Each structure stands twice: as structure tokens, then as C-alpha cells.
Amino acid sequence: MSSYHLDHLQHLETEAIHIMREVAGEFERPALLFSGGKDSICLLRLAEKAFRPSDLPMPLLNVDTGHHFPELNEFRDRRAQQLGGKLIVRTVEDAIAKGIAQPAPGEISRNRLQIPTLLAAIEEFRFDCCIGGARRDEEKARAKERFFSFRDSFGQWDPKNQRPEIWNLYNGRLNPGENMRVFPISNWTEMDVWEYIQRENLEVPSIYFSHKRPCVRRGGQWLPVNALVPPKAHEEVRELVVRVRTIGDIISTGCVESPATTTGDIIAEIAAARVTERGSRADDKSSEAAMEDRKKAGYF
Amino acid sequence: MPLTALASATPVPVDILRFNTCGSVDDGKSTLIGRLLYDSKSLMEDQIEALERSADITGGGQINLANLTDGLRAEREQGITIDVAYRYFATPRRKFIIADTPGHVQYTRNMVTGASSANLSIILVDARTGVIEQSRRHTAIAALLRIPHLVVAINKMDLVGWSEARFLEIRAQFEEFLPRLDIKDVKFIPMSALNGDNVVDASVHTPWYVGPTLLGHLETVHIASDWNLNGFRLPVQWVNRPNNPTDASLHDFRGFSGQIAGGIVRTGQKIIAFPAGIVTTVKQIWTYDGPVEEAFCPQSVTLVLEHDIDISRGSMLVGLDHLPGSNTELQAEVCWMHARPLQPGKRYFLKHTTHTVQVSVTEIVNKLNLATLESDPAPAELGVNDIGEIRLRAAKPLVFDGYAINRLTGSFILIEQGTNATVAAGMLCPPREIVKPENGDYVI
């Protein structure tokens, strides 16, 4: 019997591949949300495992807030090209110019503005399903989400009225205008993601590894100094050896001091970590229900 | 430091235990999970900070462990859990996936959702009230879903003075109805989730209890393979045909991709492709990491076959031993999950493995009475949260096994036409007839 045994990563992998193939089988126009971040890097490898030797039966889609780390976009474009995948990028900048997204007075964050940009892209390409790399261990509202997350014609999530998911039977039926978000790595933890990256020997953007970067201390975290985050008069700019644990926008992603230069170092660091991954994301700290509110409005 | 840190020097945990928790409102499910995470040092500083923050604002300064799992604002406001929440933690011995499923009557569908893939269910009972209808209902559902292991957590023992007599009394209440249900492994643990007794650390208040703590049990319970390794089954999910392969050897590649739902498959093995019923041979088991000689449930693979047979999504590839049943007339136990009741004569979509067909309900045979665990014959309808046996007629034959033999090829969901709501979870009764060869083929 022991030779017919899967370890936890193999279990998570076969579950995710099954879900990817259900998407290919049940939807007419799916897309895969690929940011270049560690979770979507795993998604791409899972897509390769699900669909090779064929081409990926779906394009890659990214909503570019205009506040991305340049290293992330460089990686995103290169990886998409390596895979021979079609990459569609829609920008918040463009959405604002077209009046699709309207910044509130003084609103600097592009977090909220991603939502109308994504919904417009879904409409433009008539996508009926978007695969995303969200994980339930990231956040409390995510913990309540299904693998197949039904969205009404406004892209909204209704947590009180989710379709029951039983065994591995996913109900992907939609009426026109409705949409599904599918999260194949729902059951993965941050640790699983890094262990998988290590096992599969996957390349990740350089900013996940330790590097030197000028930072300022703000809101209890180290923010990277850049054109969008200039140091304020009283702030001391410090050149630190840091890495990012989770990648959000450059204006809200805290850096952590770290000597980790390999995937193995990162795994050891997470094992000893005392705060969660999202602890370094200012966008989730704004209120206890920040994620819940964004998801209800159509956030992925 | 979280316990997982201890594992950093050793290889990663080798298996995953999936469990769910069920109980009625105020039995302390969320508190129990919070306690499990807190005492196993699986919580991070920012999570504890967030708990303390909300304790200062709304809790009069006292940390409420339930706030860890009651994630949505609506839940915190109403003090209830409205949906299945998933939690993850690891100890050096195992990784755990928890489905926290709510207990109120109207949310049974969530318990079925959370429990369907579980290895183990925890049924919470308030030591003061003992067994109530909810306890029976949850135990019956766990039995129906054939969850291999059950833990009866007798909680709030501090409020009954840690009385062994009370513990034994509640245990006897359970043992009165357990024989009517098909459950093999049941463990009773006295605890106080609020104070942490017997959750992670052994309690000083229960010298009369010699069994393991809850976490001790979760770490060591033997998860006999949930997966059926007899009788090869591969429901085809997706036909893999490269469009413009640059690799010349792939010009004629035609593979059938899917997750093995039972048994083992080997290169060179004979299989039957349903619904065509034609016998062919496995030429190659293709995977991204290279071809393999054999593959087993629940691996995801792509099979290349010797003959060109009409196979598409919804087809089932089957081994020649342990043959499945096939029929358009089906009998099944269902848990009804929708406010609009099941009515005989109505049509639904039935999704079984990767195959979706139209069905009509021909008869409601009986309804399970959860108070007595007896069956009431021929009810007019099944309402939300009712469990009963029904007969269905499918537009096309299903190739299936009884749920008791194989959870994956014996289960289905019903989908309401129009709204597309998932309205029922179904477990197929053993097939009346097994497929048989006729002139070498297995035409159904």
C-alpha cells in the first residue's frame, strides 16, 4: 500500500489539476489571472501539468494597477512568453482615462480601482471564468470562499448564498452575463506554495529574495522608497537588506528584513515566522472587513 | 513560535487529515477551533493582535477565540457562523485542513459541503444539554457520507463540574442510536474548549479519562486509505489534442485527461471505454513529468490508447476487473439543499463525475426521520435539509458504483434548471446489474 501513497503536495497538486481541467471542460471562454506573483506562478505550472502537451486552453490576464513593482512586470512578460501563452494586460490607468474607473478625491491606492478594470476586461473578452491564485489561508473572508466562486452579472460575491460544493463535483453552470472565479489552490498554505516552488524548481521574481533597498518606516512597516513613495521630511531613509513576502502595489507592500537568498532560506524563514503573510499588506489592515467588502464588490 | 517551526529541520509532513466540526449554535465549535490553533501555536502575532483589537472594541477586553473563524462582519454581528470556513494548520506529525461547519438547522447543506471530503468529523455536544436532535442529525449525516472516523467532543465539561457520570451518560445516549448507523470508529473526549482542557493539553480535571487529547487523536488516528484502489475508473475530463505541435511526434497525439477515481492503471493494460463499451489497451500514461508505468487514485493523468474510439468529456475508462454498473434507472439517497422542495416528476441536471445528464425524479421512496433515525415511506416531497431515498430516470445511462464502494463514482449533485442552483447531494445505491460483455464488447 505504501507505494500508492501521495504526500501532501502531491495531494494538493492533483486536486488543483482536477479543478483546472474542470474549468477547461465546463467553460467556453476561461482566462487565467497571472500577476507574476508566487501564487500565480504555481497556477501556471499546474496549468502546464493539466494541459500539456497541448497549448494552455486559456489566455493569461493581468490587471496592471500602474503601481506594480517593475521586477514583477518584467517577470510576468518573460514567463508568459516562455510558455507561449497569450498575455492580456489591462491597466487601471487606461480604465481611468476611459471613465471606467473613477478615483475618489485624494485616492492614491489602486486597490479599489482594480475592480472595475477587471470587470471591464471580463466584459471586453466575454470571459465566463477567471482562474485565480487566491488561497483560503490568506485572509478570513477568503477562508469562506468556494473553489468555484459564483459571481452575478455585476461581478459580486454573495457569501450567504454560495453554491454547496460536495466531493469533487463542481457546478459551473451559468446564465448569460454571470461569471465564475475559480481558485485551484484554495487549500494551499503559504508554506505549501514555497515547498512546491522548491520541488518544481520554479523561477520567481527577484524581489522575493534578499536585496538592498532604501526604505522608510511607516505604519509599522518598511516601505520601499520610490517615485510613488517619496520620503517625507521627517523620515529617515535607510538602506536595508530586505525581501517582500507578498507582492501588492509598490505603495502598500511592506518589505521584511531578511537574508534569504534561496527558496530553501525562504521556507526556513516562513517556518519560523511570527506574523502572517498579509500582515505586511496595508490594504488588508484598513479595516477588519476590508477584504470582505472588496470581494463583495467584485474583487477576485 | 508556531509548532510548524519544529518541523523545519525535518522532512515536510507526509499526509493531510481533513476534518470538519459540527454542533449547534453555542456548542462552541469556533471556540474549539480557535483553541486548537491557539494552543498548538499555529497563530501568528498579527492574528492575536487582531483578536486583542476586537476584544478591546467589542469584547470588553476579553479575547474571543470564536473571532478567529467567524470571519465575516455579518457573523461577528450576529455571533453565528454563516458558512463553511476553512482553516489550515500543521504540527510536526501532520497537516490539517479544517472545515468549520455551522450547526443551525437551516445550514445542513454547509455541513454536507464541509464533511463530504473529510477523513474525520468532530461532533460537539454541550455537556449540559447532552444529545439533542442536532447531534443525531450531524451523526447521521457523517454516517451517510461514510466519513471513516468520528469524534464526539463533549464540551463545556467545566459547567457540569467535570462529572464523569455526566460524561458516561451522554456517551450512553450516543451509543443508543449509533448501532443504527454504519460508523466504525467513534471516540468520546471530555473537554472545555474555552479553557483548553483536553484540546491540546491533557486536563488536570479529568483524571478518570485515560484517552488522548483531541490534537493527540487527530495526529495519530490511522487514516486508512480513503481512496479505493480496486477497480480502475477514469472519468474523462478533457480530450488532450495539441493543435499545432512543433514536436512531430505529437502530431497524432490524442490523450484523455482526468483524475483517477478508483484503482490502478498500468501501461499495456486492457480497459473498456464507456459509453462505447469498446475494449482497448493503454498505450501510454502521459504526465508532464514524463510517462509512467502505472498510476493510481487520486492521481491526475493523461492516457493514450491503442484504438481510435469516440471518447469525450463525460466518458469513463474502466478496468476489466471489478466492473461498474450501468443504468438509466437509478436509486440514491439524497440530502436536499434548497428551499424549493424536491418534487416527483421535476427535471434536473445530474452531475456525476465529469458527466452531466438530464434526469427526472420518478419517486420519493422514503424520508429519514432524524428524531427516530427510522424511515417514513413515500413522503410527498423532500424539503431543505431533508434526507431521503429517491428514484431517478436519466436521459443517458450512467456508469457508476455504489457510494459505499467508491465515494467518487458513487456520488452526484443535482442542479436546478434555470437557476443553476445546486439543490442536492446524492449517494447512489449499489447497481442492480453489472455491465457484461457481449461478443467481446460491453455495450450499454
Image: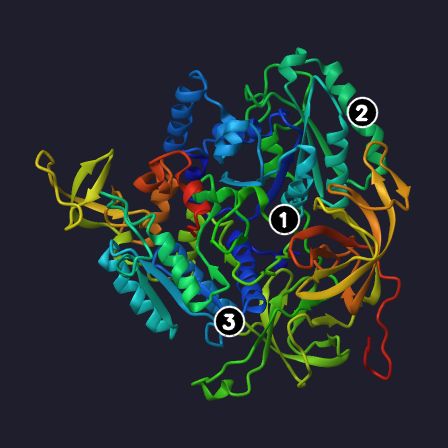
- What amino acid does circle 1 point to? Pro
- The residue that appears at 33% across and 63% down in the rendered structure is A90
Query: In the image, are marks 1 and 3 on the same chain?
Result: yes
Q: Chain of mark 2?
A: B
Q: Is residue A281 visible?
A: no
Give the position of the N terminus of chain A as an image quadrant.
bottom right
Give the x, y percent position of residue B259: 61, 64
The residues tagged by marks 1 and 2 sit, at their Cα atoms, a distance apart of 31 Å
Give the x, y percent position of residue A136: 48, 45
| Dot 3: element | helix
Which of the 4 image quarters holds residue B284? bottom right
The disc placed on residue A164 is 1
- The residue that appears at 11% across and 38% down in the rendered structure is A232
- In the depicted structure, whether residue A172 falls above or below residue A136: below
- In the depicted structure, whether residue B63 falls above or below residue A25: above
Q: How many marks?
A: 3
Q: Is residue B225 left or right of residue A56?
A: right
Q: Is residue B407 left or right of residue B34?
A: right
- What amino acid does circle 2 point to? Gln
The disc placed on residue A51 is 3
How crowded pointer 3 is (Cα within 10 Å; few <14, some 14-19, many 20+) is rated as many
The residues tagged by marks 2 and 3 sit, at their Cα atoms, a distance apart of 53 Å
